[in-house]
């Protein structure tokens, strides 16, 4: 019965979602394919993008107007591990962390950070209380951060 309900919902949503061209829309479109071999091939094409989707979306905040439909986002993990390409300190002492995948995170709490050296750096970012995020670089003390890019 669940499969029938899922398939009915998928078939109803798939055309509109697929037209939007977003990842979840394409997943729903694949789920609606009756032929097993074609459905499997469809998911195979999406697999690389699906594996990276949660990491890319981690920490991202989307603002929508009251007239927009809510965005369907992939399930976000509780933590991610990323390679840091650069660490910079602003004039006010705030640290910025640029990741190899293009994300940029900045320090949001008044805490003096030092001793990172010249790299290589690995960051673990995890969800904190109240929608905040905590980052540890190379196992050092955690600092509150927010994603700006």
Image (cartoon, rainbow, N blue to C red):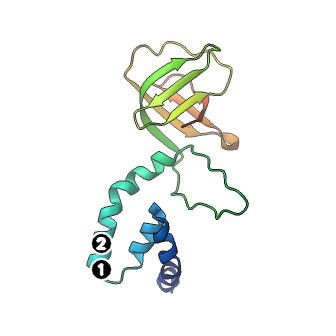
Position of residue 95 measured from the top left corner of the image (x, y, whole percent): 57, 21
Q: In this view, does 31 lie to the left or right of 114?
A: left
Relative to the observer, which residue lies in front, 56 or 138? Answer: 56
Residue 21, image x, y percentages: 45, 64
Q: In which quarter of the image is residue 148?
A: top right
Quadrant including the C terminus:
top right
Q: Which mark is residue 99?
A: none
Mark 1: give few (<14), some (14-19) or many (20+) Cα within 10 Å.
few
**Residue shown at 45% from the left, 61% from the top:** 23
| Residue drawn at 34 percent across, 67 percent down | 43
- Quadrant hosting residue 47: bottom left
Secondary structure beneath label 1: helix
Task: Tell me the SS state at disc 2.
Answer: helix
Q: At which x and y percent is residue 139? A: 47, 25
Give the labeled residue for mark 1.
Answer: 36
Residue 144 to residue 90: above or below: below
**Does residue 9 appear left or right of residue 61 in this picture?**
left
Residue 13 sits above or below residue 47 on the image: below
Left or right? Give the position of 36 relative to 13: left
Q: Are marks 1 and 2 in contact (CB under 8 Å)?
A: yes
| Residue 101, picture quadrant | top left
Residue that badge 2 annotates: 40
Above or below, 74 relative to 33: above
Determine the residue located farthest toward the right in the rendered image: 66
Q: Distance between the residues labelled 1 and 2?
A: 6 Å
Residue under the point 61% across and 19% down: 94
Q: Residues within 10 Å of mark 2 (few under 14, many from 20)?
A: few
Q: Nearer the viewer, residue 22 or 51?
A: 22
Residue visible at 29% across and 64% down? 44
């Amino acid at each position: 019965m669940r499969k029938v309900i899922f398939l009915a919902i998928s078939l109803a949503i798939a055309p509109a979602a697929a037209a939007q061209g977003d990842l979840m829309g394409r997943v729903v479109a694949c789920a609606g394919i009756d032929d097993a071999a074609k459905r499997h091939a469809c998911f195979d094409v999406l697999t690389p993008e699906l594996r990276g989707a949660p990491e890319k979306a981690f920490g991202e905040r989307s603002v929508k107007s009251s007239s927009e439909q809510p965005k369907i986002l992939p399930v976000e993990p509780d933590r991610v591990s990323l390679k840091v390409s650069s660490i910079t300190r602003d004039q006010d002492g705030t640290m910025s962390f640029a990741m190899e995948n293009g994300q940029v995170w900045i320090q949001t709490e008044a805490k003096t950070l030092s001793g990172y050296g010249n790299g290589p750096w690995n960051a673990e970012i995890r969800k904190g209380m109240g929608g905040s995020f905590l980052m540890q670089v190379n196992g050092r003390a955690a600092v509150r951060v927010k994603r700006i890019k």
